[in-house]
Image (cartoon, rainbow, N blue to C red):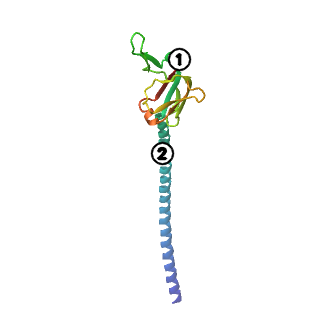
Amino acid sequence: KEKAELEAFLAKLEERITNQESQISELLTELEHSKGVIKELNQNVADLKSSNQEKDNTIARQIVEANKAYFIVGTYNDLKEAGVVSKTGGFIGIGKTQSTAVNMPLDSFTEIDRTKVTTISVNLKKALVVSKHPEGSYELVPDENDESIIAYLRILNPTLFWQHTRYLVVSTK
């Protein structure tokens, strides 16, 4: 009777071991599948990070490009020689006004970030803003020691100042 009980107990243990081995096998299969899914997800995350970095770089370049502005300061003769300004209008040479040329060469200009630069150094007499910028969006500030000299141009409202053109041309005498 004890032998039969022992054999029945062993049979139950063997059945239990077989069930557990089957469960272990299923869990190992599931674990391998999960490892594959995790690897795929990690690759997706890496791809997304790379894609986001590329987009961030593109956006940064576009912001820099969008905020580029150019300025030039010089005498009328220097600006005319550089192909930046010309005189138009008037009658028999009287009353002509300076205006910007149609195809201004950029190599004569200084490039700036229009969101960061609020002053442009002039340090010459009788400055005239030739390019089209709304009145009140800037001011010509005289030198503290000599009021006949314009020390710099101060941009008071950058959004308004740069709304018509990215080019600032200041002619001096």
| Amino acid bearing label 1 | Asp
> Residue, x 49% and y 65% (percent of image)?
27
Disc 1 crowd, CA 10 A, few/some/many (<14, 14-19, 20+): some
- Residue sitting farthest toward the bottom: 1
Depth order, front residue of 2/168: 168
Callout 2 secondary element: helix
* Number of other residues with Cα within 10 Å of mark 2, as a class: few under 14, some 14 to 19, many 20 or more: few
Check the image and name the residue furthest to the right.
145
Mark 2 vs mark 1, foreground winner is 1
Count every numbered label the image shows and give the total.
Answer: 2
Q: Earlier in the sequence, mark 2 or mark 1?
A: 2
Q: Is residue 43 above or below residue 99?
A: below
Give the residue drawn at x 52%, y 37%.
Answer: 116
| Residue, disc 2 | 52
Determine which residue is flagged by label 1.
78
Q: Is residue 79 above or below residue 2?
A: above
Label 1's element? Answer: helix
> Where residue 11 sits: x, y (%)?
49, 79
Q: Viewer-proximal residue, 149 or 110?
A: 149
Mark number displayed over residue 37: none
- The residue positioned 45% from the left and 17% from the top of the image is 86
Q: Is residue 112 above or below residue 77?
A: below
Kind of residue indicated by mark 2? Asn
Where residue 30 appears, x then y in whole percent? 47, 62
Give percent across and percent down for residue 29. 48, 62
Distance from Cα at disc 2 to Cα at disc 1: 47 Å
The image position of residue 73, as x and y in percent, is: 53, 24
Does the CB distance between marks 2 and 1 fall below 8 Å?
no
